[in-house]
Image (cartoon, helix red, strand yellow):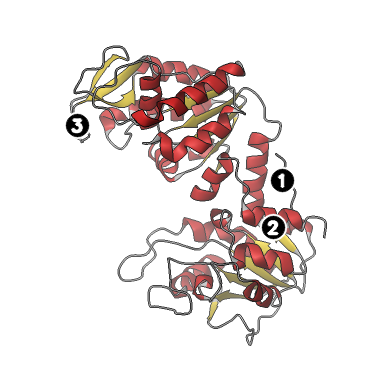
Amino acid sequence: MTLQVKKLAELDIRGKRVFVRADLNVPQDDAGNITEDSRIRASIPTLRYCLEHGAAVMVTSHLGRPSEGTLGADDTLAPVAVRLGQLLGEPVKLVADWVDGGFTVEPGQIVLLENCRCNVGEKKDDEALAKKMAALCDIYVNDAFGTAHRAEASTHGIAHFAPVACAGMLMSAEIDALSRAFSNPRRPLIAIVGGAKVSSKLTILKSLADKVDQLIVGGGIANTFLLASGKRIGASLAEPDLLEEAHAVMGAMRARGAQVPLPEDVVVADEVSALARANTVSADAVGANDRILDIGPKSAARLAEIVAQAGTIVWNGPVGVFEHAQFAEGTKVLALAIARSPAFSIAGGGDTLAAIAKFDIGQDVGYISTGGGAFLEFLEGKTLPAIAALEARFGN
């Protein structure tokens, strides 16, 4: 699918009032100190571009899960304003009670509008609220891909009523990467889907089975597929009630001449812990008390060979319990194969990002998605409301 939206870099924004919806929802400790600021740093290119091109910039975001109509001590964006100011090299004023206006921002200046989820009607995509926000600006910029799967007033409604609606730098990069992966991709198109449960990824697996040339499954998902193929999996995590669905996915792939390559050897232990003793066995020799916690070296080498031949790689989820060293080798081999591959690769999801960081391959992945839930829903084939709203405004 090709996604067509207006992009910030294509517009004349000088002297315009620009409303940026960013994703500045960062973790904080009990004292209110930001413990990880990657989302704030990811917003800087759009904000800096707007400032350097003479726009009057308003930026807002959600933070946490506040009750609408109230602003608690844990809900304020005050620490975010401080960090934004440090990154931009100028103070960033925080504006409360901003929906009805009453504040000023000049071209070349920026203000941070307090937590948008504190506004009554935000989560329900209230039209009256969306119109009030749209009236504040000449150009609406959505740069919050992480919230693109939610239809809320600041991510969806405002896009319909603002004079102009476009994607920011981060959102544009996400749209370009996803379009590149699924709109006429270089083939073979390989998808890697790991995780504990088939049930949590079933719609993704079904959607990908219609698109990809090889569907690599890992973790508890692979155990369910092994069980569906007639293998004994001992005490491994699996979902026996979903064997029919696993058969359907494999059948859909076979019907297209595609494959779901299953492990031929696995790493087992009798418990999941840092002290567990790991053994590598054939996939046909899993004992009654064994838990499959990683793929074995033969399987890892086979998957690495598949990845090496890929034209496009979509990665969501590890293939083993990589947090423990004795069960990390399969994910490591796969990660390094992706890093070495000349294919375009896109990765997303919290565990995937943790694996990328652990094996230090971030610079070798084509694109790392910032949106966990939004990335997954895109893989499911769902329409993301915030992007759909931008698409609807492409021609006007």
Viewed as shown, does residue 359 lie left or right of 123? left
The residue type indicated by label 2 comes to Ala
Q: Residue at x 53, y 82 (%)?
A: 96
Give the Cα distance between marks 2 and 1. 11 Å
- Residue 268 at x, y percent in the picture: 25, 23
Where's the C terminus, which quadrant? bottom right
Question: Can residue 308 be seen in the rendering of this structure?
Answer: no
Q: Which mark is residue 389?
A: 2
- Residue 245 at x, y percent in the picture: 46, 28
Is residue 284 placed above or below 71 in the rendered structure?
above
Q: Residue at x 41, y 23 (%)?
A: 225
Question: Can residue 213 be seen in the rendering of this structure?
Answer: yes
Is residue 312 placed above or below 308 in the rendered structure?
below
Label 3 vs 2, first from the N-terminus: 3
Viewed as shown, does residue 277 lie left or right of 179? left
- Residue 233 at x, y percent in the picture: 29, 21
Q: Residue at x 77, y 74 (%)?
A: 15
Q: Which mark is residue 257?
A: none
- Residue 45 at x, y percent in the picture: 62, 58
The residue type indicated by label 1 comes to Leu
Residue 357 is drawn in which quadrant? top left
The residue type indicated by label 3 comes to Glu
Pointer 3 and pointer 2: residues touching (CB < 8 Å)?
no
What residue is pinned by disc 1? 3
Q: Nearer the viewer, mark 2 or mark 1?
A: 2
Label 2 vs 1, first from the N-terminus: 1
Is residue 271 placed above or below 81 in the rendered structure?
above
What residue is pinned by disc 3? 271
Pointer 2 and pointer 1: residues touching (CB < 8 Å)?
no
Residue 301 is drawn in which quadrant? top left
Give the Cα distance between marks 3 and 2. 48 Å
Where's the N terminus, which quadrant? top right
